[in-house]
Amino acid sequence: MIVPSAPFGRDVIESLIPHRAPFLLVDEILELEPGKRVVGRRLIRADDWWFPGHFPERPVMPGVLTIEAIAQAGAVAVLAAEENRGKTPFFAGIDECRFKRIVEPGDVLTLECEFTRVRGPIAKGEGRALVGDELAAQAILTVFVGE
Protein backbone atom coordinates (compact mmCIF):
# COMPACT_ATOMS: atom_id res chain seq x y z
CA MET A 1 0.00 0.00 0.00
CA ILE A 2 1.25 3.47 -0.85
CA VAL A 3 0.43 6.02 1.82
CA PRO A 4 -1.23 9.06 0.25
CA SER A 5 0.21 12.44 1.05
CA ALA A 6 -1.45 14.43 3.82
CA PRO A 7 -3.97 15.79 4.43
CA PHE A 8 -6.26 12.77 4.70
CA GLY A 9 -9.16 11.59 6.85
CA ARG A 10 -10.40 8.62 8.82
CA ASP A 11 -10.62 6.24 5.87
CA VAL A 12 -6.86 6.38 5.34
CA ILE A 13 -6.15 6.56 9.10
CA GLU A 14 -8.11 3.31 9.54
CA SER A 15 -6.09 1.70 6.75
CA LEU A 16 -2.91 2.43 8.74
CA ILE A 17 -3.74 1.92 12.43
CA PRO A 18 -5.92 -0.72 14.13
CA HIS A 19 -7.98 1.71 16.27
CA ARG A 20 -11.71 1.96 15.54
CA ALA A 21 -14.70 3.92 16.78
CA PRO A 22 -15.53 4.70 19.46
CA PHE A 23 -11.85 4.56 20.45
CA LEU A 24 -10.36 6.16 17.32
CA LEU A 25 -9.42 9.64 18.56
CA VAL A 26 -7.93 11.18 15.39
CA ASP A 27 -10.19 12.71 12.71
CA GLU A 28 -7.59 13.75 10.16
CA ILE A 29 -3.88 13.93 9.44
CA LEU A 30 -2.61 17.31 8.31
CA GLU A 31 1.12 16.58 7.93
CA LEU A 32 3.02 13.29 7.75
CA GLU A 33 6.63 12.19 7.46
CA PRO A 34 6.38 8.38 7.74
CA GLY A 35 8.37 7.04 10.67
CA LYS A 36 9.33 10.54 11.81
CA ARG A 37 6.64 13.14 12.39
CA VAL A 38 2.89 13.74 12.26
CA VAL A 39 0.35 16.49 12.84
CA GLY A 40 -3.27 15.44 13.27
CA ARG A 41 -6.53 16.90 14.42
CA ARG A 42 -9.54 15.87 16.50
CA LEU A 43 -12.77 17.82 16.99
CA ILE A 44 -14.01 17.26 20.53
CA ARG A 45 -17.73 16.63 20.17
CA ALA A 46 -20.37 17.18 22.85
CA ASP A 47 -21.62 13.62 22.25
CA ASP A 48 -18.20 11.94 22.69
CA TRP A 49 -18.70 8.74 24.69
CA TRP A 50 -16.78 9.82 27.82
CA PHE A 51 -18.66 13.05 28.60
CA PRO A 52 -21.76 11.54 30.31
CA GLY A 53 -19.49 10.20 33.07
CA HIS A 54 -16.59 12.70 32.98
CA PHE A 55 -18.22 14.88 34.27
CA PRO A 56 -22.02 15.17 33.90
CA GLU A 57 -22.14 18.79 35.11
CA ARG A 58 -18.75 19.85 33.68
CA PRO A 59 -17.75 17.83 30.57
CA VAL A 60 -13.97 17.47 30.38
CA MET A 61 -11.96 15.17 28.10
CA PRO A 62 -9.96 12.82 30.35
CA GLY A 63 -6.27 13.66 30.25
CA VAL A 64 -5.35 10.06 29.57
CA LEU A 65 -7.50 10.16 26.42
CA THR A 66 -5.73 13.33 25.31
CA ILE A 67 -2.43 11.43 25.61
CA GLU A 68 -4.01 8.48 23.79
CA ALA A 69 -5.05 10.83 20.94
CA ILE A 70 -1.44 12.05 20.63
CA ALA A 71 -0.25 8.42 20.63
CA GLN A 72 -2.76 7.44 17.93
CA ALA A 73 -1.53 10.28 15.72
CA GLY A 74 2.02 9.07 16.42
CA ALA A 75 0.94 5.55 15.49
CA VAL A 76 -0.06 6.85 12.06
CA ALA A 77 3.50 8.10 11.55
CA VAL A 78 5.09 4.87 12.83
CA LEU A 79 2.82 2.53 10.86
CA ALA A 80 3.05 4.63 7.68
CA ALA A 81 6.72 3.59 7.50
CA GLU A 82 6.90 0.66 5.09
CA GLU A 83 8.72 -1.65 7.53
CA ASN A 84 5.91 -1.28 10.10
CA ARG A 85 2.80 -1.58 7.93
CA GLY A 86 0.20 -3.94 9.30
CA LYS A 87 1.82 -4.14 12.74
CA THR A 88 0.33 -3.12 16.09
CA PRO A 89 1.62 -0.22 18.20
CA PHE A 90 1.70 -0.69 21.98
CA PHE A 91 2.52 1.85 24.69
CA ALA A 92 5.85 1.05 26.32
CA GLY A 93 6.15 4.25 28.34
CA ILE A 94 4.80 7.70 29.07
CA ASP A 95 7.29 10.11 30.61
CA GLU A 96 7.32 13.77 31.59
CA CYS A 97 3.55 13.97 31.10
CA ARG A 98 1.97 17.33 31.86
CA PHE A 99 -1.56 18.65 31.48
CA LYS A 100 -1.77 22.40 30.93
CA ARG A 101 -5.33 23.12 29.79
CA ILE A 102 -8.78 21.58 30.14
CA VAL A 103 -10.14 20.10 26.89
CA GLU A 104 -13.91 20.44 26.49
CA PRO A 105 -16.66 20.04 23.89
CA GLY A 106 -16.13 22.26 20.85
CA ASP A 107 -12.35 22.35 21.19
CA VAL A 108 -10.23 21.31 18.23
CA LEU A 109 -7.13 19.39 19.33
CA THR A 110 -4.04 19.63 17.19
CA LEU A 111 -2.02 16.49 17.83
CA GLU A 112 1.73 16.55 17.19
CA CYS A 113 4.27 13.78 17.59
CA GLU A 114 7.89 13.76 16.49
CA PHE A 115 9.98 10.65 16.92
CA THR A 116 13.44 11.47 18.25
CA ARG A 117 14.78 7.93 18.54
CA VAL A 118 13.93 4.73 16.72
CA ARG A 119 15.77 1.47 17.45
CA GLY A 120 14.31 -1.64 15.96
CA PRO A 121 10.72 -2.05 17.14
CA ILE A 122 11.00 0.71 19.80
CA ALA A 123 10.30 4.37 19.01
CA LYS A 124 10.44 7.32 21.37
CA GLY A 125 8.66 10.54 20.50
CA GLU A 126 7.81 13.96 21.83
CA GLY A 127 4.09 14.55 21.70
CA ARG A 128 1.80 17.42 22.43
CA ALA A 129 -1.82 18.45 22.06
CA LEU A 130 -2.84 22.05 21.49
CA VAL A 131 -6.12 23.93 21.41
CA GLY A 132 -5.37 26.87 19.16
CA ASP A 133 -2.03 28.17 20.39
CA GLU A 134 -2.55 26.86 23.93
CA LEU A 135 -0.72 23.74 25.08
CA ALA A 136 -3.23 21.24 26.50
CA ALA A 137 -0.91 18.29 27.20
CA GLN A 138 2.59 17.04 26.47
CA ALA A 139 4.54 13.84 27.06
CA ILE A 140 7.45 11.74 25.92
CA LEU A 141 5.91 8.57 24.47
CA THR A 142 7.64 5.24 23.95
CA VAL A 143 6.01 2.81 21.54
CA PHE A 144 6.71 -0.84 20.86
CA VAL A 145 5.71 -1.99 17.38
CA GLY A 146 4.69 -5.64 17.50
CA GLU A 147 2.93 -8.24 15.41
Image (cartoon, grey):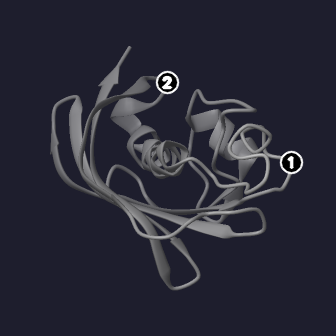
Can residue 31 be seen in this snapshot?
A: no
Q: Nearer the viewer, residue 137 or 54?
A: 54
Q: Mark 2 to mark 1: distance in Å? A: 31 Å
Count of number-bearing discs? 2
- Which amino acid type is marked by label 2? Gly
Q: Is residue 136 left or right of residue 97?
A: right
Query: Mark 1: few, some, or many residues within 10 Å (few <14, many ≥20)?
Result: few
| Of pointers 2 and 1, the one earlier in the residue sequence | 1
Picture coordinates of residue 133, whole percent (x, y):
51, 85
Q: Residue at x 44, y 38 (%)?
A: 79
Quarter where residue 103 is shown: bottom right
List the residue tagged with mark 1. Answer: 47
Picture coordinates of residue 38, whole percent (x, y):
45, 60
Q: Is residue 118 left or right of residue 89?
A: left
Mark 1: secondary structure: loop
User: Quick check: 24 above or below 126?
Assistant: above
Query: Mark 2: few, some, or many residues within 10 Å (few <14, many ≥20)?
Result: some
Quarter of the figure that contains the C terminus: top left
Q: Nearer the viewer, mark 2 or mark 1?
A: 1
Quarter of the figure that contains the N terminus: top right
Q: Residue at x 65, y 35 (%)?
A: 15
Q: Nearer the viewer, residue 67 or 56?
A: 56
Q: Is residue 144 left or right of residue 32?
A: left
Mark 2: secondary structure: loop
Residue lying farthest to the right in this orientation = 47
User: Quick check: 133 above or below 58?
Assistant: below
Q: Is residue 36 left or right of residue 23?
A: left
- Which amino acid type is marked by label 1? Asp
Picture coordinates of residue 23, whole percent (x, y):
66, 33
Q: Residue at x 40, y 52 (%)?
A: 34
Which numbered disc covers residue 86? 2
